[in-house]
Image: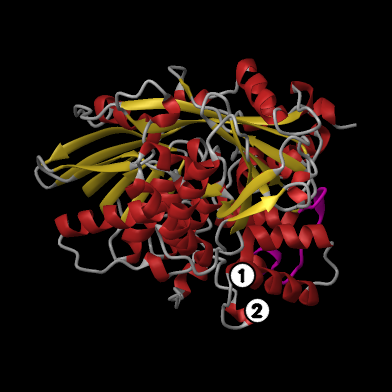
Amino acid sequence: MNHRHTGSAEQAAPATQPTAPRDCDVLIVGGGINGAGIARDLAGRGLSVALCEKDDLAAHTSSSSTKLIHGGLRYLEYYEFSLVRKALAEREVLLKSAPHIMWPLRFVMPHDPSMRPVMMIRAGLFLYDHLARREVLPASETVDLRRHAAGQPLKAQFKKGFVYSDGWVDDARLVVLNAIDAAAHGASILTGWRCTDARREAHGWQVTLTDASGATQRWKARALVNAAGPWAAQFLREHAHLKDTKSLRLVKGSHIVVKKLFDHDHAYIFQNPDRRIIFAIPYEGEFTLIGTTDVETDSPIGKAQIDDSEIAYLCEQASRYFAKPVTPADVVWTYAGVRPLMGDESSDASAVTRDYMLDYDMNGAPMLTVWGGKITTFRKLAEEAADGLCKRLHNRQPSWTANAFLPGGDLSAWIGPPQRPDTDFERFDAALAERHPQWHADTRRRLARCYGSRIELVAGSQGLGEEIAPGLHEAELVYLHDHEWARSPDDVLWRRTKLGLHITDTQRQAVARWWAARWPTDARTEPMNTGDNVRTTTWS
């Protein structure tokens, strides 16, 4: 695949909130993956775009996924062939676009004879290998767990396993990179601004945005996009003064993080007696991520929290496979998000489709509502949304994102022409080590993963500067504030990075003090709850 390099995407995003005109072609409500992806695609086609997000980018569902770029092997059981094919085709497109935040991952499924029979699994994996073209990811295979490294942490009863390929993604950074690229193409990214009113007029929408202080902005847009995720139906009723035409099922997905349970680089997919599956994935070097649950919820959308029964469920199911039991006492961090799934008649939340629907209301100025979706198909969703909006707004620019790098993803200035996403990143890390031998190896690799070829924007000509917390320097904090819309320590520690998981509460407080001294009016009035789920007693 020949990637088209977009030079402006490698430039810095605006250092302050944009001062663009209050008129735009499209105003997007929602700063999750779908909203950011649509903003990027539309801005790259020359449309003027504004995106508003009431909190931080990826503050909710889009930073609470299982962090996989995957086709969804289990969806084959529900005959979701179209969704799986679409997701499988997107895996390598995404892997090639940003090899610093996405990479291939091999998954091991230990065979439990009491679950699905061998022939069913082999048939499913055959389809998984062949529903879409693969250039980078290897095919599935059967392994002897008595000899394979992945068998060592498991109970002795698991002798046979099936190995297949998918990918890993830093979900919150994926959202931010799309926003950076949108801004580089001229979009206005307005975090901390809630859309409080949207009224349709003859030739456009009159939109009011309000921030936490009560200040307002008024925008006029030719078209409006409702990418509010779990809030989509609520937004239509309460703010756009329209009837919600689709029903959403709000399903909470929760995850636990424990100290690492194995040393190899494969992940696991475990079959459970309730016919669901969970994953156990290498996470942040020192940990294992286990999830997810599927629990229908009517709790406040923005305050999703794991409950004790979900922790017990994930520990119990993981302990069915691992030789060393996983207990609630082992959990060092949790997170939960609410997935907005399309309503259907299924009584099983895990069987509800993860596909999306683009719903156009053309009774006047265009309104697009995005229903459902999954992170793997965000780019395709955005492309289809942009195609539809451009047709209605008489813009003839073609789609472009399938062959474009995300910001930081073009490593050619460091390594020459791209070869394979996984080996390209390793070559980039080696080149970075040569250029900055003074950097600690762990810090260098983390920065390489976060920022890719934008790394020099972080370090600048003055270097990394003072270390505020282990591995976190003032230059990175300034960069995240000035170029990635970080407006609180939580934005940095739990979304732009996951450093909050690696440092103590005392060290997190040191970051907060530094931040408050540098930007005393910046912190949001409503703190994010992500860090509250850290069990700080696990550190000495």
Q: 507 and 58: which one is in front?
A: 58
Is 377 placed left or right of 441 in the picture?
Answer: left
Q: Residues within 10 Å of mark 1 (few under 14, many from 20)?
A: many
Color scheme of the displayed model: secondary structure
- Quarter placement of the N terminus: bottom left
Is residue 483 in view?
Answer: yes
Residue at image position (45%, 71%) is 8
Q: Which residue is mark 2?
A: 414
Callout 2 amino acid:
Trp
Q: 125 and 465: which one is in front?
A: 125
Callout 1 amino acid:
Ser
Q: Secondary structure at mark 2?
A: helix
Residue 287 to residue 99: above or below: above
Q: Secondary structure at mark 1?
A: helix
Residue at image position (66%, 66%) is 455
Q: Earlier in the sequence, mark 1 or mark 2?
A: 2
Task: Answer whether residue 460 is magenta in the image.
Answer: yes
Q: CA distance from mark 1 to mark 2?
A: 8 Å
- Quarter placement of the C terminus: top right
Q: Are marks 1 and 2 in contact (CB under 8 Å)?
A: yes
Residue 19 to residue 458: above or below: above
Is 34 placed left or right of 367 in the picture?
Answer: right
Percent across and percent down for residue 20 are: 36, 56
Give me the disc on residue 453. Answer: 1
State the extent of the magenta-drawn residues as a range: 456-472
Looking at the rendered structure, the number of numbered marks drawn on it comes to: 2
Query: Which picture quadrant has residue 307?
Result: top right
Percent across and percent down for residue 357 are: 28, 42
Is 107 placed left or right of 242 in the picture?
Answer: right
Is 361 placed left or right of 527 in the picture?
Answer: left
Question: Please, which residue is most extreme toward the bottom here?
Answer: 416
